[in-house]
């Protein structure tokens, strides 16, 4: 009999990993496109200048995406070693709290 899937910590961790991964790929493509075509004027120049020219904004966007993605990757790595379901939940929340503290520390220290 197949076990019913719930909306627990594992689902939120999975969703967080997918969303941050997708946003990182989108950011990468926009960044490469903007660098390649920066001499061509577009209606979106004001937005691209905010995102990529302002060093603090660019670093903050990357930090907010990379830290949760990387820390959740460490959790997935630990799952491969067979930690219990309870330990997975504890590890997820501990890493997310650590990630929020790290993001705040980077933000408050000036973003670089």
Image (cartoon, helix red, strand yellow):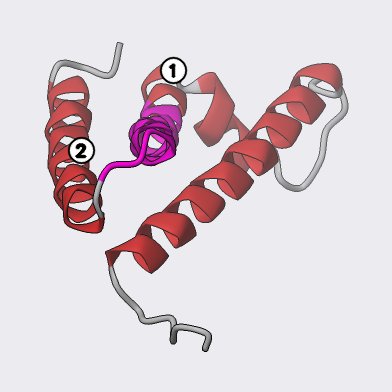
Residue pictured at 62% horizontal, 48% vertical:
22
Q: Is 65 covered by the magenta stretch?
A: yes
Write down the quadrant of residue 82 in the picture.
top left
Work out whether residue 4 or residue 111 is closer to the camera in this orientation and state it: 4
Quadrant in which the C terminus is drawn:
top left
| CA–CA distance in space, label 2 to label 1 | 26 Å
Compared to residue 110, the image places residue 3 above or below, namely below
Write down the quadrant of residue 102 in the picture.
top left
**Label drawn at residue 55:** 1
Work out whether residue 67 or residue 47 is closer to the camera in this orientation and state it: 67
Work out whether residue 60 or residue 71 is closer to the camera in this orientation and state it: 71
Left or right: residue 92 compared with residue 62: left
Residue pictured at 59% horizontal, 30% vertical:
49
Work out whether residue 103 or residue 1 is closer to the camera in this orientation and state it: 1
Left or right: residue 61 compared with residue 23: left
Q: Magenta span covers which residues?
A: 60-83
Left or right: residue 20 compared with residue 39: left
Question: Can you identify the residue that label 2 sits on?
Answer: 95
Left or right: residue 49 compared with residue 13: right
In primary-sequence order, the first of circles 2 and 1 is 1
**Label drawn at residue 83:** none
Q: Quick one: label 1, few (<14), some, or many (20+) residues within 10 Å?
A: few
Q: Position of residue 25 (x, y in %)?
A: 67, 38
Q: Position of residue 53 (x, y in %)?
A: 55, 21
Q: Quick one: label 2, few (<14), some, or many (20+) residues within 10 Å?
A: some
Compared to residue 39, the image places residue 30 above or below, namely below
Q: Secondary structure at mark 1?
A: helix
Residue 46 seen by the camera: no
Compared to residue 44, the image places residue 67 above or below, namely above
């Amino acid at each position: 009999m197949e076990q019913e899937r719930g909306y627990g910590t594992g689902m939120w961790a999975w969703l967080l990993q997918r969303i941050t991964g997708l946003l990182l790929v989108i950011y990468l493509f926009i960044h490469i496109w903007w660098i390649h075509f920066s001499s061509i004027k577009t209606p979106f120049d004001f937005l691209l200048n905010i995102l990529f020219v302002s060093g603090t904004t660019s670093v903050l966007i990357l930090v907010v995406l990379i830290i949760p993605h990387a820390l959740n990757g460490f959790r997935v790595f630990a799952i491969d070693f067979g930690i219990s379901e309870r330990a997975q939940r504890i590890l997820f929340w501990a890493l997310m709290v650590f990630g929020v503290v790290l993001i705040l520390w980077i933000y408050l220290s000036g973003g670089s």
